[in-house]
Image: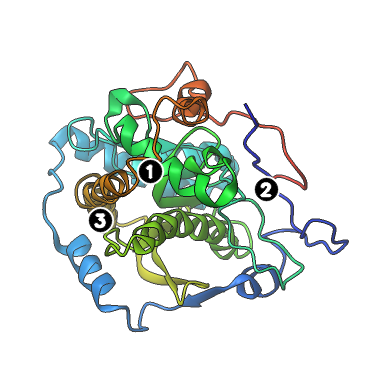
Amino acid sequence: MTSIPFTAGTTKKGSASVTSGPAAPQYRTNNLERNGFRFRIASDPLPQHIAAHIEQVRTRDSYPAPSVEALGRIIDSINALERWTANPEEVGENALKSHILEKIFPELSMSRHRCVKLQRNAQMSDLLVPDDKSNKLQIVQPRPDAIYGYSSSITREAFTRGQEAAHANIYDSSLKGEGFQFLAATNCGLRLPFLLVECKTSWGLQQLHVALNQCAGGLGASLNAVARLNDALRSMDAEPVISDFVYGITINNTEAILYVSWKENAVIYVIQTVQKFDMHSASAVMDFRKQVSNILDWAHDDRLSQIRVALDTLIRGNDNEVHITSPKRKSAIGHDKKCKPSGENSAGVHKEKKFKKRRGKTRQD
């Protein structure tokens, strides 16, 4: 089986030009904006359908109220963030990241989010990362601190084998049988991500600015994964049905920022601030948890239903082309199983599995 290329170079292949990565002062201008990214503030107008969805995320009240005991744990977690802000020598960045992701973020519910999977520090395929051929400087390969998408594991029931085969068939037609390289957005088999998270500490200079630089490439890759499905529907004269936006979060021990991202004119990647949250305020943290939970609910219910409808449409339109028993497609479908670590827990969290790189460097935090 051909290895899946996950690479992290900062320059175009064959170019001698380099950049020091997302922390560099000119990275946003030279690497992101010149590869099609645009950054907007919260007061800028949103597309109508995205604005309507964000309103639902903010106001939907389906998030279950925590028990008294759970609320106490959340308060303790907030107090720890405040203490570490005053005494940064007490905690390292990795310990802080784990605390934020495990204590501040809402847990995935196996009853409500069965098909959603969380991966931490997973590399994303550079074949999905935005790449303007006219710009010699490349976007560093994304490796988000946390990324939410869908598992291909049959036990999680996100997609049938027929739907996964239809997904592979999209790329076979244009990439000479290399479609399985694109099935997984990450090196451990995550499909069609919808929420990315980058964590930092507050005591580093412009750390949330750097976190957004890191998050941007992953948001662009996630949008491209969705766009390929919608483009396949258009090629069959079918209406695109999948929501064309994804979410990102940058967070440290004092503040969290929620972003929404979408594509314009097929080549522009817009990232807009939605809301900022004070991580030392119990009410703000509870609002943050509610909104993240509402995004998870949307992804598991509405968005996943849209994706399934799209894949079923492709199956009907390509009955003579989709062969589930094809060795190539069996490799594609089985990729997640081969990459799955033995220690995965009930929420689908795993540590990164290393893959051979084609070129360049991995992201350096």
Q: CA distance from mark 1 to mark 3?
A: 17 Å
The x and y percentages for residue 357 are: 72, 38
Q: Single out the mark in the foreground, 1 or 3.
A: 1
Image disc number at residue 363: 2
In the image, residue 226 sits, relative to residue 17, either above or below, namely: above
Question: Badge 1 local density, few (<14 within 10 Å), some, or many (20+)?
Answer: many
Q: CA distance from mark 1 to mark 2?
A: 21 Å
The residue at which mark 1 appears reads as 149
The x and y percentages for residue 108 are: 28, 36
Task: Report helix, strand or loop for mark 2.
Answer: loop
The front one of 331 and 123 is 331
Q: CA distance from mark 3 to mark 2?
A: 29 Å
In the image, residue 292 sits, relative to residue 273, either above or below, namely: above
The residue at which mark 3 appears reads as 291
Instruction: Tell me if 56 is positioned left or right of 36 in this view.
Output: left
Q: Amino acid at mark 3?
A: Gln
The x and y percentages for residue 230 are: 36, 60
Q: Earlier in the sequence, mark 1 or mark 2?
A: 1
Question: Badge 2 local density, few (<14 within 10 Å), some, or many (20+)?
Answer: some
**In terms of image quadrants, where is residue 89?**
top right
